[in-house]
Amino acid sequence: MDPIDDLRAFAFRLQQVRSVIHSFQPRVPHPPLLETPAPNATLQSPSKGALPGLRILREEVNRECAVLERFLQNPTRSEGSPCLSANAPYLIAVWQELVYSHRPIALYRNFFPGNCSQGRIPHGRKLSSRPVKVDVVSENGARWTRVNTIKNSRLVMEFRELDSYLTSSSEEEGDNDDRTRHGNLTCPTASQELENSVLRMARGLLAAAAANLLPISGHVPQVTLRLTRLNPTLVGDSGVEADPRIARTVTILRDMGIDVQLGERPEVLRDNCREVQQIELEPTSNINLDLSALIALVSDITHAPLPRSPDEVQARFKHRKLSSEDVSTGRTLKTVSNHDNNETYDTAHDTGRRSTEENEQTRALLRQVTQEMRKGLLQDMYERLSSLGHTSNVKFWTTQEARQRCLQIVAKIGGPREQRRAHALLAVHDCSRPSEAEERRSRAAAEAAYWGDSRYPLGYLPLTPVHVLSSCHAAAPNSKEGSIRAERISPPSSSTYFSSLSAACAKLLVDNTNFQPCTQRLIVPKEDPPGLGIPQDLSIDSLVDIPPPTLIGAKLTAHTVESMYAGASRGWTTLTANRTSVRMFLKEIDKRGGLDTSQHSSNDTTATSPAVIWLVEPRSLAEGMRVDNDE
């Protein structure tokens, strides 16, 4: 092909790239978060803003387009005429790698190599300490792609230069090495090492990858080398066989662990042509309940008959007024759980509200009842869990600390029916093994106590009893250091989301210097009496006084992190009503590499995946705020 025609073809392709690159936005995959109800704006992993390095690629494409356009306006001039553009094929190839890549996080990023002891670097060869350039960093950092547009002719020139050097060295040493010298002119012997710029690039990439491990998994990034214009078999369209050392170079690259890709992508893929696989989330058969979920499951809002009209909604709860004493002291008693964080209940704060203003907590209860009228929490749980088969196969779990804190909270501010449900849901048998008949009677008594006065039928969901995880299993305490080991626990699911969240939780606990494992924070209570006698009320005096929550950062507590870790480390879906903590967990995962969807590699348009987190709207303890409450 005529060189001018080549330039016109490159100019046309670059103009295609320029027309779409300004609107390119990398797709941020949705986290495996099952939200009920589905919100208008799905809670996603925090956005990282503009893709780092994309602006540089845009500028280079614009500049190259301008250069080619100016030259093609007068291609016949001889003075100052450029040769065939060497930069256009590279820019086109980088763009192709970007739009084909999964979860790109950076372009044109430099990494520094470290002391590589992977056995991939030949003995005695020194590695440069200069930074190594990676064109596209994708799959949340797990894949590095480098584009090399070297041609067969350029690589053959390197071979000839090396041959010339070896030939002159052999002549100086005499004729004793004549046979070896002649062998070098065609192909190096097995004892001689092949060397060229492509292999040097690959060694630098491997050394940098070994020195820059992934933050969560600790794995070495996979290096992909895209050789767009190298043909190890033929020289262009001539039909002439290529130098065998080119094929040997490709073989050596693959033996080093490099993912070698030959040739260009089929075409410059436009961003809007990419098809995104739809992922259907479903909960696991084992459900981990955090504190906010336990509160929601015993709440009067969840179980009470629904109002029949908006007027009945307004009339259900007491519209408390702040007394002059409350206003003057600035102190109120929160009688229900916080909308996002069920951990602080009796608090002094500056309200700044007049005595005639409606209580904030009443408004929160009204919102929750309205939400319950749209779709009940238990109804939604039943429908989603029924997709797994019979709901009797589902088991519910919680941590020891979440259980104790729930019982303490319900004892303080819950109504009689809420206290009865909490005791039935979270009762623990005595140490002696009951007979099978006694166990059946105990379960039946717990079910009757939990579902009593509920608008749902007896046994609607297999909630009772909630199984309690021992704290050591939930957070793996290190007895020597009194801290949490950030050990990797392989979940039963193939999804990488569970391991990512588990590692992020473990790292949060390790990084918190004031953290104490829950086994040290809690005073283990006495076992409940044999059987499940259902008390008329849950007395605060009968419960162990639990210390205030230990904060990890501004918006997370230690037991919240431990609860999430307990589910993620086992590959179980965690049910929570704490939206604030979910948002914080997503930020932590995003800081440590983000969420990956690369395990979904089937060709189907729809795939199923276990939900790591099941986020529901909160239901507060509301029985004490009802107008018809006798207290």
Image: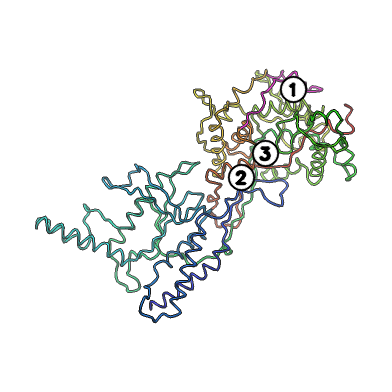
Instruction: Residue at 48%, 56% (x, y): give it.
Output: 107
Q: Which residues are magenta?
A: 527-551
Q: How is the image coloured?
A: rainbow
The answer to whether residue 88 is left or right of residue 120 is: right
Which quarter shows the C terminus? top right
Between marks 3 and 2, how big is the CA–CA gap? 13 Å
Mark 2 or 1 closer to N-term? Answer: 1
Instruction: Residue at 50%, 24% (x, y): give it.
Output: 481
Residue 534 inside the magenta-drawn segment: yes
Which quarter shows the N terminus? bottom left
Frontmost of labels 3 and 2 is 3
Q: Which residue is mark 2?
A: 610
**Helix, strand or loop for disc 1:** loop
Q: Position of residue 299 (x, y in %)?
A: 78, 34
Q: Amino acid at mark 1?
A: Leu
Question: In the depicted view, which residue is nearer to us: 547 or 371?
Answer: 547
Q: Amino acid at mark 2?
A: Pro
Mark 3 or 2 closer to N-term? Answer: 3
Question: In the depicted view, which residue is nearer to us: 116 or 346?
Answer: 346
Categorize mark 2 by other alpha carbons within 10 Å: few (<14), some (14-19), many (20+).
many
Q: Given contact means CB atoms under 8 Å apart, are the residues at marks 3 and 2 in contact?
A: no
Q: Which residue is mark 3?
A: 575
The answer to whether residue 20 is left or right of residue 132 is: right
Q: Amino acid at mark 3?
A: Leu
Q: Position of residue 83 (x, y in %)?
A: 36, 73
**Helix, strand or loop for disc 3:** strand
Q: Position of residue 559 (x, y in %)?
A: 63, 31
Instruction: Residue at 64%, 51% (x, y): give it.
Output: 280
Q: Position of residue 546 (x, y in %)?
A: 68, 23
The label shown at residue 532 is: 1
